[in-house]
C-alpha cells in the first residue's frame, strides 16, 4: 500500500488540527484504508463512538481513495450509512473503501468499518463527484 501526503489542517488527516482525527491513509490498487481508535471525546452514549463520526470516517476514506487515484478532490453528493454494531471507545477499527464503478467524474464507492475480530460495524455506499476525470 502507498501512503498519502499530509495536509496540515485536514480534519481527517491533518497533524496540526487540534481537534482532527489524524488518520493515516493507505491505498492499494483495490482499496483505501485507515485505522482509528476512538477516544472519549468521540463518544455519544457512554462508551460508544458517535455515529456521525463513524459516518465521517467512512466519508473521508472513500473520498481519499479518489484523491489518491486522481490527484483531484472529490465531493460527496450522496452517502447512505448502515450501522450494524456499536463501536466501543478504545476499540481499534479499520475503515476500508473500494471503488464500485465510475462514469466520467462520478464515482460510486463502498465503505466498511471493521472491528478487530472482522465484524462489520458499519457500511456505506456513496456517490462522489471528482473535480476532474478519474
Image: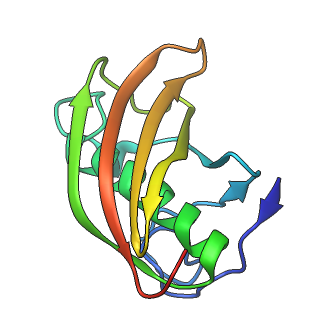
| Picture coordinates of residue 33, whole percent (x, y) | 62, 48
Q: Specify whether 9 is left or right of 48.
A: right
Write down the quadrant of residue 78 in the picture: bottom left
Q: Specify whether 69 is left or right of 11.
A: right
Write down the quadrant of residue 74 in the picture: bottom left
From what the image shows, is residue 34 above or below residue 6?
above
Q: Residue at x 46, y 33 (%)?
A: 113
Q: Nearer the viewer, residue 35 or 16?
A: 35
Q: Nearer the viewer, residue 39 or 68?
A: 68
Q: Specify whether 95 is left or right of 45.
A: right
Q: Residue at x 34, y 29 (%)?
A: 122
From what the image shows, is residue 57 above or below residue 107?
above
Q: Residue at x 30, y 27 (%)?
A: 47
| Picture coordinates of residue 116, whole percent (x, y) | 60, 20
Q: Specify whether 37 is left or right of 83.
A: right
One can see residue 19 in this view: no
| Picture coordinates of residue 88, whole percent (x, y) | 38, 26
Amino acid at each position: 500500500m502507498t501512503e498519502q501526503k499530509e495536509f496540515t489542517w485536514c480534519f481527517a488527516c491533518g497533524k496540526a488540527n487540534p481537534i482532527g482525527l489524524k488518520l493515516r491513509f493507505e491505498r492499494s490498487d483495490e482499496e483505501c484504508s485507515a485505522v482509528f481508535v476512538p477516544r472519549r471525546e468521540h463518544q455519544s452514549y457512554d462508551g460508544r463512538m458517535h455515529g456521525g463520526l463513524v459516518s465521517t470516517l467512512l466519508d473521508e476514506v472513500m473520498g481519499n481513495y479518489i484523491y489518491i487515484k486522481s490527484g483531484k478532490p472529490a465531493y460527496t453528493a450522496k452517502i447512505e450509512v448502515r450501522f450494524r454494531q456499536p463501536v466501543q471507545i478504545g476499540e481499534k477499527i479499520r475503515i476500508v473503501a473500494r471503488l464500485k464503478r465510475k462514469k466520467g467524474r462520478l464515482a460510486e464507492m463502498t465503505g466498511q468499518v471493521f472491528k478487530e475480530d472482522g465484524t462489520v460495524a458499519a457500511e456505506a455506499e456513496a456517490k462522489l463527484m471528482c473535480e476532474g476525470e478519474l
